[in-house]
C-alpha cells in the first residue's frame, strides 16, 4: 500500500510502497477514507535526529484519521461492524493509570514506560491506505459525517476544544478571547469559542487571507499579528486586555504577543509547538493570570466535538490532496500557505 513516511532526519517526507498491515490481537484495521494534515508534523520534521529516532524511523505520518473498519484482529470486540465509518482518538494511553482512569488518556503517565505512541507520532499513522488502531476504545463512530470534514476534528478541533474548556469559566458575558494563528486549529478554535461562550472573539494572523478566514468562521474582529495589536486589543477591551488568549502558533513573537494581550486574572493558553517559551512570574505575567500548555484532548471531548459537527455548529474549511501531493503540502505548511486544513484522501 501507499504511505507517506518521514524516513531520514532533515530530508523531505517520501511517498513509499509498504506491505498492508495485518491487525494483531485486539487491534482493528482501518481503510483510511480521509486524513487531516497537522502543522505538528513540521515540528516532528524539525526535531533533532536523536529525538525523532526515539519515535522510530521510518514513520508513517498522519494523526487525524477517519476510515472504515476493514478487519478485526483476534479478540477485538465491541459495538462495531466491518464497514463502519469511524474517527480515531489519537492520544493513546494505557487505559489504567490514574490520568487514564479519569479520562485524561492524553496525559497517560505510563505511555512512555510502556512504549505506547500515538498514530503518526510514533506508531504508524493515517497518511496511508490502511492503518492499525491498537484498541476498539480509540474508535468513535461518525455516522454519515463527510470523512474529509470529519478527519480534522481528531486534532484541529479536539485540541482547541480541550484548551478552550479549560478557560471557559473565565469567558462570561463582556469577556474577550483572542485567537493567535487562524490556521487549522485556530479557525476551529474561533467556532468553538462562539459555540461555548458569549466572549467577543478577536482573530490574529499574518495575512489578510487568514484574517478573511477568521471573519468567515465568526470572529468579531481581526487584527494583523504585530506590535500594533497590543494597543488595538486594549482599545477593543476598554483598556483591560483579553480575558483569555489562545496561542495556536508557538513561535516566540506569537508567545510574546500573547503575554502582552492577556488581562489581569485572565488565562494564557499556549497550544502552539513552535519552540517559543513564555517567562512567568511576578511583574512579568499579568496578576493572577493562569498559564497552561495543554496537549490534545480526551475521548469524551472528541465525542462532544463530533456531536457539534453533526449539529452543524462546527465547519472545517478543507482542501483535499492525494498522498502523492503530501511532500508539497508540507512545504506549503512551512510557508504558512495552508488555509484551513489540508486533508489527504488516499
Ligand atoms: P497551521 O499552519 O494550520 O496554522 C498556523 C497559523 O499561524 C497559520 O495561519 C500562520 O499564518 C499563523 N502564524 C504564523 N506565525 C504567526 C504569528 N507570529 N502570529 C500570528 N499568526 C501566525 O497550524 P496548525 O496545524 O493549526 O497548528 C498550530 C500549532 O499548534 C502548531 O504549532 C502545532 O504544532 C500545534 N499543535 C499543538 C497541539 C497540542 O496538543 N498542544 C496539537 C495540535 C497542534
Ligand atoms: Zn496535530
Image: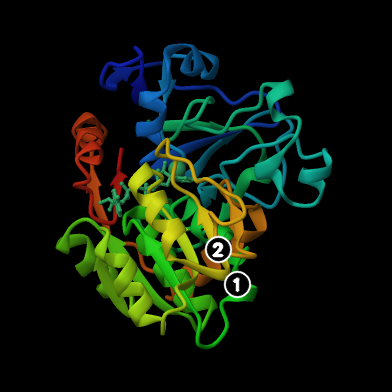
Give the quadrant of ligand 2.
Answer: top left
Left or right: 134 in relation to 184: right
Is the C terminus in the top left, top right, bottom left or bottom right quadrant? Answer: top left
Q: Nearer the viewer, residue 211 or 59?
A: 211
Q: Which mark is residue 289?
A: none
Left or right: 34 in relation to 304: left
Quick check: is the Cβ at mark 1 less than 8 Å away from ligand 1?
Answer: no
Q: Residue at x 23, y 55 (%)?
A: 339
Q: With respect to residue 60, does 252 lie above or below?
A: below
Left or right: 24 in relation to 68: right
Q: Position of residue 331 (x, y in %)?
A: 20, 33
Q: Residue furthest left?
A: 208
Please name the residue that numbered disc 2 is placed on. 286
Q: Looking at the image, what colour scheme do you see?
A: rainbow
Q: Is residue 172 visible?
A: yes
Q: Residues within 10 Å of mark 1 (few under 14, many from 20)?
A: some
Q: Is residue 217 visible?
A: no
Q: Position of residue 257 (x, y in %)?
A: 37, 56
Q: Residue at x 64, y 23 (%)?
A: 24
Amino acid at each position: 500500500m501507499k504511505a507517506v513516511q518521514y524516513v531520514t532526519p532533515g530530508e523531505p517526507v517520501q511517498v513509499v510502497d509498504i506491505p498492508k498491515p495485518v491487525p494483531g490481537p485486539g487491534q482493528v484495521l482501518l481503510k483510511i477514507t480521509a486524513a487531516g494534515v497537522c502543522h505538528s508534523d513540521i515540528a516532528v520534521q524539525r526535531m533533532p535526529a536523536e529525538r525523532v529516532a526515539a519515535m522510530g524511523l521510518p514513520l508513517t505520518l498522519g494523526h487525524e484519521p477517519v476510515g472504515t473498519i476493514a478487519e478485526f484482529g483476534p479478540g477485538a470486540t465491541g459495538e462495531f461492524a466491518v464497514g463502519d465509518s469511524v474517527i480515531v482518538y489519537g492520544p493513546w494511553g494505557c487505559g489504567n493509570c490514574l490520568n487514564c482512569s479519569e479520562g485524561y488518556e492524553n496525559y497517560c503517565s505510563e505511555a512512555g514506560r510502556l512504549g505506547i505512541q500515538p498514530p503518526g507520532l510514533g506508531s504508524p499513522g493515517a497518511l496511508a491506505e490502511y492503518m492499525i488502531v491498537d484498541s476498539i476504545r480509540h474508535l468513535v463512530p461518525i455516522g454519515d459525517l463527510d470523512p474529509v470534514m470529519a478527519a480534522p476534528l481528531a486534532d484541529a478541533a479536539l485540541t482547541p476544544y480541550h484548551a478552550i474548556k479549560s478557560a471557559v469559566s473565565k469567558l462570561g458575558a463582556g469577556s474577550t478571547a483572542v485567537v493567535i494563528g487562524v490556521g487549522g486549529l485556530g479557525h476551529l478554535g474561533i467556532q468553538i469559542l462562539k459555540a461555548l461562550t458569549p466572549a467577543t472573539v478577536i482573530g490574529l494572523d499574518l495575512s489578510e487571507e487568514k484574517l478573511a478566514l477568521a471573519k468567515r468562521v465568526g470572529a468579531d474582529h481581526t487584527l494583523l499579528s504585530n506590535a500594533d495589536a497590543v494597543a488595538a486589543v486594549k482599545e477593543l477591551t476598554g483598556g483591560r486586555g483579553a480575558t483569555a488568549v489562545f496561542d495556536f502558533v508557538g513561535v516566540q513573537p506569537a508567545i510574546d504577543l500573547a503575554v502582552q494581550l492577556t488581562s489581569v486574572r485572565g488565562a494564557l493558553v499556549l497550544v502552539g509547538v513552535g519552540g517559543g517559551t513564555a517567562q512567568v512570574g511576578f511583574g512579568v505575567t499579568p496578576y493572577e493570570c493562569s498559564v497552561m500548555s495543554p496537549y490534545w484532548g480526551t475521548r469524551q471531548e472528541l465525542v462532544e466535538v463530533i456531536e457539534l459537527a453533526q449539529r452543524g455548529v462546527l465547519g472545517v474549511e478543507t482542501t483535499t490532496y492525494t498522498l502523492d501531493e503530501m511532500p508539497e503540502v508540507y512545504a506549503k505548511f512551512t510557508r504558512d500557505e495552508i488555509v484551513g486544513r489540508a486533508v489527504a484522501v488516499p
